[in-house]
Image (cartoon, rainbow, N blue to C red):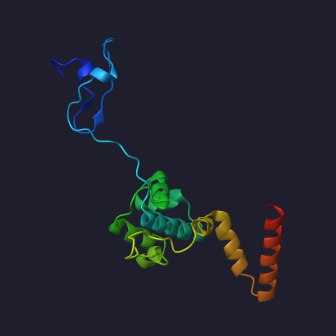
Amino acid sequence: MTGHRLCDVLWVGATSPCFAISDPDCTLSNLTLRGPIQMMVKKSPNPTDKYVGSRVRMRRLMLGMSQEKLGEKLGLTFQQVQKYEKGTNRIGASRLQHIAQILKVPVSFFFDGAVAKSAEDGSAKPPVADYVSDFLSSSDGLALTRAFTNIKDSRLRRRVVDLVEEIAGEQR
């Protein structure tokens, strides 16, 4: 940066912002831009990555495994497992295969129920409403589902559904 006032340099290198301004006469209007300007846009997770991540979470919870334990078996931190489960970070093919082995399911399990992009508008529609998938991926949703499916009497299951609907209706 020799020969340049700090006011003259807004971008150093390809993507590193440098906003150190030491000249009191320096304003945004007289800044000179040097190097390529790249806007840092926060990307939202890809719907497929979110779906695969939610299936990893659901299976992990079904086995009663913590994020820490899965991370340990993968050689990762629990924060990285969280990012995978939220779809923030993509899971590579070999890593997904390793996760499938640890969670004792075929790789296809993570894509079961996923819908491919439609040919008409190119958008992907989730296979079920997001709130259903989110609920089934939660520990409460998983516990309720596990307990409910253990009820063998279909009339009793129907009464449980009626009870829950009645309670939910009272809370609106």
Question: How many numbered discs, if any?
Answer: 0
From the viewer's perspective, is residue 3 above or below residue 115? above
The N terminus is located in which quarter? top left
Query: In this image, 152 relative to 50: left or right?
Result: right
Q: Residue at x 27, y 19 (%)?
A: 7
**Residue 153 shows in this picture:** no
Nearer to us in this view, 62 or 170: 170
From the viewer's perspective, is residue 142 above or below residue 34? below
Nearer to us in this view, 97 or 85: 85
**Residue 73 shows in this picture:** yes
Query: In this image, 139 relative to 97: left or right?
Result: right
Nearer to us in this view, 100 or 138: 138
From the viewer's perspective, is residue 88 above or below residue 155? above
Could you say which quadrant of the image residue 65 lies in?
bottom right
User: Residue 77: x and y, percent?
Assistant: 45, 52
User: Residue 121: x and y, percent?
Assistant: 39, 71
User: Residue 40: x and y, percent?
Assistant: 35, 43
Q: Residue at x 59, y 64 (%)?
A: 134
Q: Residue furthest left?
A: 3
Q: Residue at x 77, y 77 (%)?
A: 161
User: Residue 64: x and y, percent?
Assistant: 60, 67
